[in-house]
Image (cartoon, grey):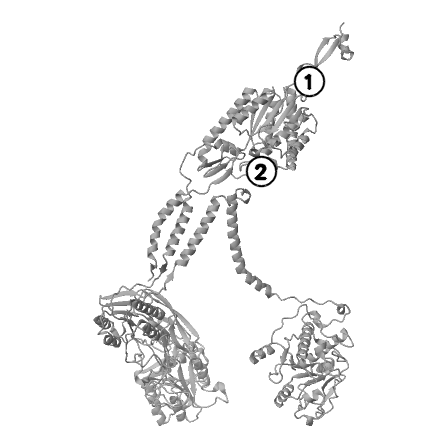
Amino acid sequence: MATLLKSAAEKSASDMFGRESEAHQLADRLPDLMLDGVRISNTVVHGLHGRRRPGPGETFWQFRQYQTGDTFQQIDWRRSATSDHLFIKEREWESAHTVWLWPDISKSMSFRSHLSTVYKSDRALVLMFALVEMLVRAGERTALMGLTQPSISRKTTTRIAEMLAANLKQTGLTTSTPPQQRVARFSSVVWISDFLDPIESLAKRVDELAASGSRGHLIQVLDPAEETLPYSGRTEFIGVEDGTRWMSDRAETLRDAYRTRLLEHRAALQDICRRNGWSFILHHTDKSAADTLLQVTMRLRGEPVAKEKVEAAT
Amino acid sequence: MSGLAFLNPALLIGLLALPVIFWLLRTTPPAPKRVEFPATRILVGLADKEKQPERTPWWLMLIRLLAAALLILALAEPVLNPVRKSTVNGAGPIAIVIDNGWSGAPRWSDLTAQVERLIAEAETQGRPVVIAPTARASRFQSLKIETANQARSSAAAVQPYPHAPDRAATADALADVLKSQSGVSVFWITDGIDHAAGARTFADTLLSFSASATLIELGQGQEALATVAVLGQGGRLEANVLRAAGPARQGTVYAMSQRGQRLAEARFAFEPGATTTSTRIDLPLELRNQVTRIEIAGERSAGAVHLLDSRSQWHRIGLIAGTSRELAQPLLAPLYYLDRALAPFSELAKSDDTNLVFSVENLIKRNVSIIVLADIGTIPRELKDKLDQWVKRGGVLIRFAGTRLESGGDDLLPVTLRAGGRQLGGALSWSTPQPLAAFDDTSLFAGLPVPAEVLINRQVLADPGRIGPDVKSWARLKDGTPLVTAARRGEGQLVLFHVTANSEWSNLPISGLFVEMLRRIAALGKPGGVSLSAEAPVTSTTEQVTDTAEVLPPQQNLDGFGILKPPPPTAQAIAADKIADLVPSAENPPGYYGPQAIPRALNLAGPKTVLKPLPALPVAFERRAVDTAAPRPMKPALLGSALVLLFADILATLALAGAFLGWRKFSSRDAGRGAATVLVALTGLVALVGLSALPSATAQAQQFPPQGFPRFDSQMSRGAQTCPQHLTRPRPQQAIPTDPVARSQVATGKVTFGFIITGDAAVDRVSEQGLRGLVACLTAKTAVEPADPAGVNIERDEIAFFPLLYWPVLPTARALPEATLAKIDGYMKSGGLIIFDTRDAGTSFITPGATSGDRTTPLARLLGNLDIPRLEAVPEHHVLTKSFYLLRQFPGRYDNGQLWVEAESPRDAERGRQARRVDGVSSIMVTSNDYASAWAIDERNAPVFPVVPGGEPQREQAYRVGVNIVMYALTGNYKADQVHVPALLERLGN
């Protein structure tokens, strides 16, 4: 039905911080899951991902014989005492991961149907802030694409919120695709959007991002109405971003065709993700954000998501 | 009959457009819902599976079609009960025959409306009209062919007459007029009754000269009713209701008294097709005799009224006793018990004459129907013949035994008496007092219970050998001896009670049975009385026998609607012997005839009257019913409903567009516009309702008078409360009416004080305010709660109502006219009290000891010719000093003046024209202290003038003086008597 069209640009700063605090609460509910993740994967301590090679770190990696050039401080005297050689204790090289985030708060995200209670953009922001908060707590470096530099500061979440609130009016923020930004290798990209743009432009952008060697996660946030087209009767549909209009005399007859098209579009998206080794997560605004957040954290951690879960999501 | 016609039937073709409208409505899709939808891009290009447009809901379609249909119908201007188009063709005159006898009166408005329609029809066709009423006041009838316009006024002049129509004469008159005409259309608006069996002939005559004839009848159940009051079993009043034909019908009959009181009602009901029904009017005899008129409720016609005359009313009974002991020992007087027993249901006539002959003659002259002779032994021969003749004409002679009769009777007795009576149960008798035996079935008293305590001690005895076969024993003693015997003689009766009419011989007269017996005997009396002269009623009040009253002049007559009115000029007198069988006519309309006191009633319907319906008429007569309903255009109603439907359509369309799903969801412009429309409509409605409610709201607001504020000032704290401040609110000021009657009603409704209107507005205002203040003080502090004071114009108004008059004396006062002085004098002598106040603190007031000759002071000028009594300053123990408050001084606004009251007059000789002290109360008070100014309060109960020199305590004193004066005026010297209470108590104690 009629929606209150409120563009993301009009969202006030306080609204943004509201989202942030909501995300904090969401993140607070999840520490147990994190600990579980720690137990399963011993190779990672909080957020620092072992590079499986010696380097600066805290986890023991190997002993090797002393070579010229090594400093005395490096010698492990206890190990060296057991034999005639001097040994040096090497630790695994551990470095923080960088996660680049891009929430879509364009016009098309400012939609809420009668089936849902939250706007898509709100949900996207909540997901993003929760993710940032969790990543920050885990010691990862996070950054908003095009706006902030990667940081491991505790205040990152707040800083991102501030940046968003300060730059709401900028056109870069109101586009659905993330801005052009060089993303370092091995870093991750989390792109939260409804991905209703033409599939070609999406594919192009994903390919560009993937080309830098980063891993990516697409979170498609959809209103349940966009999934089921719950309209009937003589209805005129008005596209939000480009003003496209489509008139239907009996909207209820369009449902099947629309669903087919939507699934095709999503399949294409998933195809792109698969091709680039990215993951795809579907989220509906009438569902809990925690569920999706859990999925994202698991994906970030590199764990496979249960097959049936993906199926169910699609 | 009702019907429906269209003024613009051509517009009904528009109804053919309804299918087109239907199709249009079907194909025009409703406005689409607009939805902001991010995924529109995906939708683009998706085609609807069903190409046909969304259908308008069927109910919305129905509303719209209905509105369209109503609109078309409204434009076609339908009219309910239209003026019927004539089906009769013809070019000649239209003859309208109206049955305007009594039977047309109940539906007269329908009939005249019908005539009106017919005339209108004739007017449109341009045909002349003949109005032919079948009943007339005169014997001869002249009819005219008139234009429709003239006919209208002729028709308006036609009124229903209180007698049956004379159709034959009308037919002749019509034939005379219309014989030469051709193409005549006759309309006969009939009452449906075949009066004098002439309807068939009448119809034939009508057909003989008319081209077409139409009979216009009253509808079913609207037939005229007639009523006849008859005396049924036991003298009971019964009403027969008659009609010619008709379905089952119910109604009510009223019995009315002469003064128009409804004494009784009785329901009647007709079986279907029945032409007569009867109902009984149950009334006690006393009331029944007061019934003068029986009428059918709601049936306004002369036939529905039956007048009762004296013949059906109570009897006049003459009482004559042999002795006249009434004065000395009323309980032993022979007529005492008769009087008591008969008075409730009959008129008693007693003769004061001691001469028996004169007495009886007097009674017969007074037209009595029953004569009671108590203990009259011998009747002079001359009188005996007269009485005999009277009895033979129908009089009832009741005789009571007594010592005189015991010595032998005469032949005006039903039985021959044995000389000497019979003593039962005396000191020297073996026998015991005899009770009564049960009454025979043939007895007049059959069915009356016999009380066991009735005992007969002594009686006269009938000679058993000479009891003839015509002698009936109505009552017997236990041993079979006749106690009441009766014999017919001529048309009358002789009745003998074998005991006295007092309780000397038996205790029968003091039993209830006696009353019942007399009541039954009294019913035997000939209605209307018996007179020796022909059958002419005589006046009783004038004691003047109208022996020559052979002719009964009309007294009052019914008009066609059954209302008694003075006789019309055409009414003629009736020969007395013919009135019984006379059928009312134009010359003798129904009503009362004869002398004023005992008129005879002439009624339309008699006991033998039968109302016959119209016989089968020639088939050439077209029959139709009277159109009762007026034409009612239906256009406004139809347009209104169409409007309502269109409004409903607007609301429904808005609802479909989602306007009412929730105010929050307004986002699109169109929904907003819809909401705006609804809002405007609602606002309009609310405004309308509000506007209509507005005047009442303002009216309500005006009903609350502004409240006065109680004054709280320093006087309160000083403890010297002045009276009016006890009131929180000024009492509403009632205007004293100027009309003398209304004024007296107001003035006597409550205690009212008057002030003399001097003509000086300021002074009068102060007087009124002053008395108002005094009234407020009295109301607050005493049991006296007077009404608002009334201004009195001393020369014009009646002053007797006022117990107290306040009279401010102006310096310019002039002498009063003699008549006014007399009035004042009378007022003072009858107990009134006048306070003369010179309001000048004693500057002009000269000791009233100065005589009236001194005309220099205003007061002396004013009262110059009124001999005011000698006055004195209020002495120390005067009642005024203690009538309510204990007072020493009598200050007003000033305190240096004296209060003068009437002095105790030591010499009676001085009382001439002097106002006396009625009941020890001085009738005059003279002061100069200006009481009114001290008492005066304004609307807010605040004092108007300051008092000098004492301030508020002095004002309180002034109020106390006022209270004391009022108490003095109202209670007189009561307080003075109180002084003696201790002495009285002491004396009582001893």
Q: Which amino acid type corresponds to the residue marked 2 in the rendered image?
A: Lys
Picture quadrant where residue A220 is located: top right
Check the picture and name the quadrant holding the N terminus of chain B: bottom left
Along the line of sight, the residue nearer the viewer: B173 or B753: B173
Chain containing mark 1: A
Residue in view at x 33 percent, y 55 percent: B10
Measured from the top left, where is residue B56 in percent x and y? Answer: 42, 43
Q: Which amino acid type corresponds to the residue marked 1 in the rendered image?
A: Glu
Q: Secondary structure at mark 2?
A: loop
Residue with the mark numbered 1: A94
Question: N-terminal of the two: label 1 or label 2?
Answer: 2
Q: State how far apart marks 1 and 2 are (Cα).
A: 45 Å
Q: Secondary structure at mark 1?
A: strand
Picture quadrant where residue B493 is located: bottom left
Chain containing mark 2: A
Whether residue B917 is visible to the viewer of this picture, yes or no, is: yes
Picture quadrant where residue B51 is located: top left
Mark 1 and mark 2 on one chain: yes
Measured from the top left, where is residue B970 in percent x and y? Answer: 66, 80
Q: Is residue B71 left or right of residue B769?
A: left
Residue with the mark numbered 2: A6
Q: Is residue B695 above or below residue A20?
A: below
